[in-house]
């Protein structure tokens, strides 16, 4: 018997408990990625390595394809505005 397994991808926003900075990324395994950020094992991010152990998930969106998650990640990063990111987290801005 085969089961139905859906691969989900996540757009996520982390916030540092040390300096309140944000990190925006996407992944297939959100729980493992948070562990990687907090233990300095996520090699693709120089942004989080200096604030090791301080990251918390403050926002996430689910997507059925990595392509869609990457598009959303790029969109949010293009805002270059802490205020807009905070509004998204607070629910003032609608996702997607």
Image (cartoon, grey):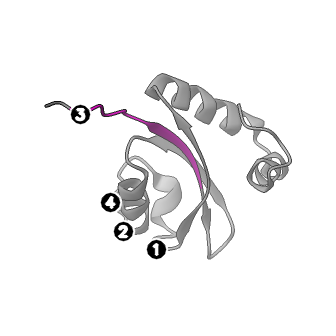
Q: Are marks 2 and 4 in contact (CB under 8 Å)?
A: yes
Marks 1/4: CA–CA distance = 11 Å
Q: Are marks 3 and 2 in contact (CB under 8 Å)?
A: no
Residue 37, given in percent of the width and then of the height, sits at: 43, 61
Q: Does the magenta segment cover residue 6? A: yes
Q: Is residue 89 above or below residue 18?
A: above
Q: Residues within 10 Å of mark 3 (few under 14, many from 20)?
A: few
Marks 4, 3: nearer the viewer: 3
Q: Earlier in the sequence, mark 1 or mark 3?
A: 3
Q: Earlier in the sequence, mark 4 or mark 3?
A: 3
Residue 3 numbered mark, or none: 3
Q: Work out how far the residue at label 4 is from the one at label 3, CA to CA, in angstroms.
A: 32 Å
Label 2 residue SS: loop
Q: What residue is shown with label 4?
A: 41
What is the magenta range? Answer: 3-13
Disc with the residue nearer the chain's start (1 vs 4): 4
* Spatial CA span between label 1 and label 3: 36 Å
**Looking at the image, residue 30 lies above or below residue 73:** below
Image location of residue 40, percent across then percent down = 37, 64
Q: Tell me the residue that label 2 is attached to.
A: 39
Location of residue 39 by image quarter = bottom left
- Left or right position of 37 against 20: left
Q: Residue at x 37, y 47 (%)?
A: 29
Query: Does residue 34 lie above or below 96 as drawn?
Result: below
Relative vertical location of residue 31 with respect to residue 12 in this rendering, above or below: below
Depth check, front residue: 77 or 69: 69
Residue under numbered circle 1: 53
Q: Which residue lies at the image location 53% right of the left edge and 31% below the top edge?
A: 69
Query: How far apart in space, not on screen, are marks 3 and 2 (Cα)?
Result: 33 Å
At horizontal 29% and vertical 31% (from top left) the residue drawn is 4
């Amino acid at each position: 018997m085969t089961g139905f397994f859906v691969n989900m991808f996540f757009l996520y926003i982390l916030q540092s408990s040390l300096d309140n900075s944000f990190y925006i990324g996407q992944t297939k395994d959100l729980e493992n990625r948070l562990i990687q950020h907090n233990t300095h094992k996520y090699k693709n991010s120089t942004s989080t390595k200096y604030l090791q152990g301080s990251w918390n998930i403050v926002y996430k969106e689910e997507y059925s394809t990595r392509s869609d998650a990457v598009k959303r990640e790029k969109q949010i990063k293009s805002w270059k505005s802490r205020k807009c990111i905070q509004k998204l987290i607070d629910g003032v801005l609608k996702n997607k």
